[in-house]
Amino acid sequence: MGERREARSSLLTRRALFLAGGQAALLATVAGRLYFLQVVDSDQYKMLADENRISIRLIAPPRGRILDRFGVAVATNRPTYRAELVPDQAGDVNATLDAVNRLVPLTEADRRRVVHDIKVKHGFVPVVIKENMSWDDMARLEVNTIELAGVSVEEGRIRDYPFGTTVSHLVGYVAAVSEDDLDGDDPLLELPDFRIGKAGIEKAYDIELRGTAGTSQVEVNAYGQVVRDLAREDGMAGQDVALGLDMALQDLAVQRCTAQGSAACVTLDLWTGEVLTLASTPGYDPGAFAAGLTSTEWQALVADPLNPLSDKAISGVYAPGSTFKPLVAIAALDGGLITPDTELVCNGEFVLGNAVFHCWKKGGHGSLSVHRALRESCDVFFYRTADMCGIDRIAAMANQFGLGTEFGLEIPGERTGLIPTRAWKLATTGVSWQRGDTISCGIGQGYVSATPLQLAVYVARVATGRKLMPKLVRPQGVMASDADAAAAINADFTAIAVADQHFDTVRTAMWGVVNELHGTGYHARIDVPGMEMAGKTGTAQIHHVSKEVRDKGIVTGTVVPWKDRDHALFIAFAPAGAPRYACAVVVEHGGATGGEGGAVAAPIARDVLLAAQQRDPVHHVPAQMFGAPPRLAQD
């Protein structure tokens, strides 16, 4: 009995020892694991915990401003409110959207956009539910976000265009990042309120305007809602871009062009090549693109017969009409084919085989020299002159004056127009060049075409005798008051290989166009002493006028449908005696009064050139210019 009691006691003792040892081993394992977690791997788990508690977010930098030559902002930023949703934190997205809709109405387009953005973006990236909310909507949603998992209200910036349609084509607009824009390299592109340039200067200088992103650290709760801000590091704002544009002149040009419907006006500073106005009407509201254009708004823009989305100043291509005649005169004078005293007879028509080319003046101008031919815009004189020159000489001279060429302007959309050649026609049509083709080109019709920008450069080169190049953007730090620095922008203008006396002959005739009694632009002259302009009117036919219609009398005026009217053109420079500014105006289908450039287009150029001179009353002259502009020889 005693032996069994001792054996049982020994067994219990061993079991107790085993149990104690097991418990000790278990406690040692737990203690070791706790030591490993809390000491050895503490930094790693602290980081993981912080990642769950702390959210690091990118902050979109303020976009750089776009300024005119005097520092007036034509594109800037203003605050706005938006509602965002983080899909990974929202749970049932549709239920969340329904809850938001009860507070702030959402359209079906809003919901479709949110669903689309969730599919193409990472789940942790916020997507915009509602943009540009009013203060009341923002406040209503803000006080209820505690019940809306994954929803937050953010203050952001939206692009603001103070002058709206006045400068839309030049400045362009920003819009939301599309799938095609996502390259995977720039996380900024995935931010919900980020916009990139889509047109104009906004597109051409998008990288410079973007800036560098900042970061913020915020503490979030289990629902992903922000509890408090922990740290913030602002990014670097985008660079400002300064233009040579004069916003006051631009506004005037747009007002005057708008009164004529569809038109363009380009004004250049002849000392620097800077573009002072680049007006195209009608325009569009760039702010609507920044905020998000609706389908209805887009369809209205596309369907508008005046084509407000087109920048007519750089991409509109038109026959130059009689504005081409000064160039033909220079080509003939330079080639020794005529002199300033050469007289040619105009009896109202020029006959070439079976073809008859008519002058605009029925019965003709009689015998006249190049001065009177330009002043009164005689067609027959330039039919004959072009026939003597031939297309090769005309084309070569036109290229020297910037026609048929591209200037590499800083914004996209520039077109080259066309100065035809024998090779071009053969390659394009399969038909050889004909003598009649040259006759038509002699008055700026036929195959010849140009943009308003090219016409402005062309008349600028006539005025200065130098190969001026247009520029939109000023070097960093150069403002309008720094005349020497501004003049250095294009200080390397090279001279055109034409004798000064030939330039003087043509400039004097262009002075006569607007300042002599029988000039076609006489009624649009500037009568302020010392500010007179010299120019050339033009009318570009868009339909062939048959003999029957001509015999019955060409119908003009508002009885002709708008789209069937001729274009009205005018090119000019001022002051006539010491050129500083050049201007080209094209009014689409401006022939309601007969299509004369002198009646429709010239008054616009007059007002702009007069204002340009009046805005610089002391006529600042840089200390070092590219070379004094040749003075007009007036006799």
Image: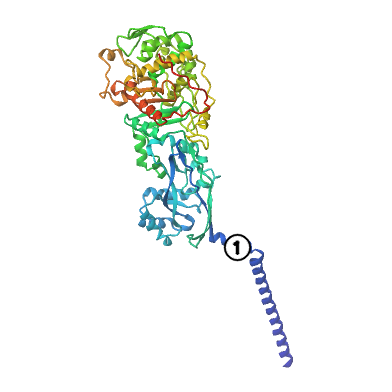
Q: How many marks?
A: 1
Coloring basis for residues: rainbow
- Taking the image as shown, residue 47 lies to the left or right of residue 327, namely right
In the image, what residue occupies the spot 27% across and 20% down?
556
Describe the element under mark 1 as helix, strand or loop.
helix
Tell me if residue 433 comes above or below residue 627 in the rendering: above
Dot 1 crowding, Cα within 10 Å, few <14, some 14–19, many 20+: few
* Residue that protrudes farthest toward the right in the picture: 3
- What x and y, as percent, mark residue 289? 41, 41
Say what amino acid the circle numbered 1 marks: Lys
Give 123 or 173, whichever is nearer the viewer. Answer: 173
- What x and y, as percent, mark residue 261? 32, 30
The quarter of the displayed image where residue 581 is located: top left
Tell me if residue 19 comes above or below residue 443 in the rendering: below
Tell me if residue 283 comes above or below residue 271 in the rendering: below
In the image, what residue occupies the spot 52% across and 16% down?
497
- Taking the image as shown, residue 52 lies to the left or right of residue 70, namely right
- What x and y, as percent, mark residue 598? 33, 21
Tell me if residue 104 comes above or below residue 307 in the rendering: below
Q: Which residue is mark 1?
A: 46
Does residue 390 appear anywhere in the picture?
Answer: no
